[in-house]
Image: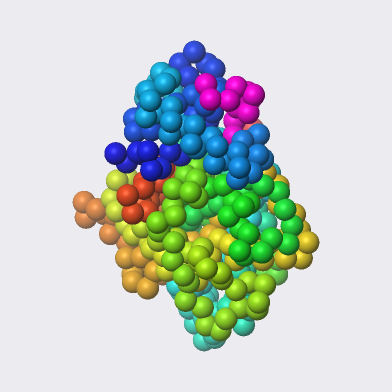
Amino acid sequence: MSFGIDNLPYGSVIGADGRRFAAARFGADVLDLSHLDPDLFAGGTLDAFLAGGRPIWTRVRADVVDALTADRYPLTPLADVTPVLAFTVADYVDFYASEHHATNAGRIFRPDGAALTPNWKHQPLGYHGRSGSVVVSGTDVPRPRGQFLDGDAVTFGPTRRLDFEAEVAFVVGRPGSRIAVADADDHIFGVCLLNDWSARDMQGFETPPLGPFLGKSFATSIGAWITPLDALAGVRTAPRQDPLPLPHLRETDPAHGLRLDLEVRINGQVVSRPPFGAMYWTYAQMLAHLTSNGSAVRAGDLFASGTVSGPDRGHRGCLLELTWNGTEPLDRGDGATGTWLEDGDEVTIAATAGAVTLAEVRGRVLPSVSADP
């Protein structure tokens, strides 16, 4: 079973009667969590549950397992509910934690210079995004409009270089600041897949000197179901880091790398299989760096890994790499080739972690919506 008793991801859904409720997914059904704790899940979201911290997460997981094995409560078919965003996203941070992705991007944009910037192996780099941009899987994504270079002229219009980025995201539950690497699991509830949609022409024109802005803030898609960290205990792995980071960022035992196998499809055609186990920085190091200056995280904070890529061409987690910035057309199946996403394209990111399946994240590109009257 893809979503069996060893997984039990959490989400929020709207039933056929219009009622919203928090749920645990089990196979092709969902369990209404208000049966277990009507107060904790009264709002139909995971907000209060996330804030409860690990003792609450452990207790509820045990209660869900007990309820399912004892057939204690009725289940609702997944086909009869509509998933919605499971929690209120407090803050959103996107990292740049894949050495393979960062190296490829460096070679594309700095062909005569060093692929990695001098700071890259000393700290997990990232930027603050917009929490309001986060949407649930299945939400359509209109092609954004913005400024970019057309030859030597600056123009405004629909992006011509729309891209996906296959990422893994982490949902914070327990608040905190200056969180040690060893304590990360006390603060992070779970994992979901994320697509950081990117308008590469807009991003390239706006980035110097402050970084990504409108080229990424139009939409960020996440999976509807959050897999608890507890379900991923069997896929831990240690990163290979040279040089070792400073003491406050050094990994502990057990390490916090995760062996997740991603798959990216465009209109059903597999275009990439990025390995998350090859990431340079771990989620615990990302959280430790994020909070190392005294910055606090809150329940509902979301942070993402950045594009997941590996050492081989078939591991590249975005079109920027797969088409080498549009210079190498990609085989899209049935003899078709392309470089960037076209209107009507549907991008699906899926992943497995051993026997555990993560909920896919899916989105379809719609034509640009003009602001003209």
**In the image, is residue 169 above or below residue 78?**
below
* Most common secondary structure along the magenta stretch: loop
Which of the pair 111/49 is nearer the observer? Answer: 49
Left or right: where does residue 100 sit relative to residue 171? left
Which of the pair 214/10 is nearer the observer? Answer: 10
Residue furthest out toward the right: 294
Give the percent coordinates (x, y) of residue 350: 37, 49
Give the percent coordinates (x, y) of residue 179: 69, 60
Which of the pair 2/5 is nearer the observer? Answer: 5
Q: Quadrant of residue 359?
A: top left
Q: In which quarter of the image is residue 50?
A: top right
Give the percent coordinates (x, y) of residue 272: 34, 59
Residue furthest out toward the left: 334
**Count of picture labels:** 0
**In the image, is residue 198 above or below residue 367?**
below
> Which quarter of the figure is the N terminus placed in?
top left
Residue 40 among those drawn in magenta: yes
Left or right: where does residue 200 sit relative to residue 156? left
Left or right: where does residue 115 sit relative to residue 345? right
Identify which residue is drawn at 60% across, 45% down: 54
Answer yes or no: is residue 14 visible.
no
Specify the color scheme.
Answer: rainbow
Residue 207 among those drawn in magenta: no
Highlighted range, magenta:
35-46
**In the image, is residue 92 above or below residue 88?**
below
Identify which residue is drawn at 67% across, 72% down: 248
Give the percent coordinates (x, y) of residue 177: 74, 57
Which of the pair 159/216 is nearer the observer? Answer: 216
Identify which residue is drawn at 48% across, 36% down: 62
Residue furthest out toward the top: 17
> Which quarter of the figure is the C terminus placed in?
top right
Identify which residue is drawn at 55% across, 79% down: 116
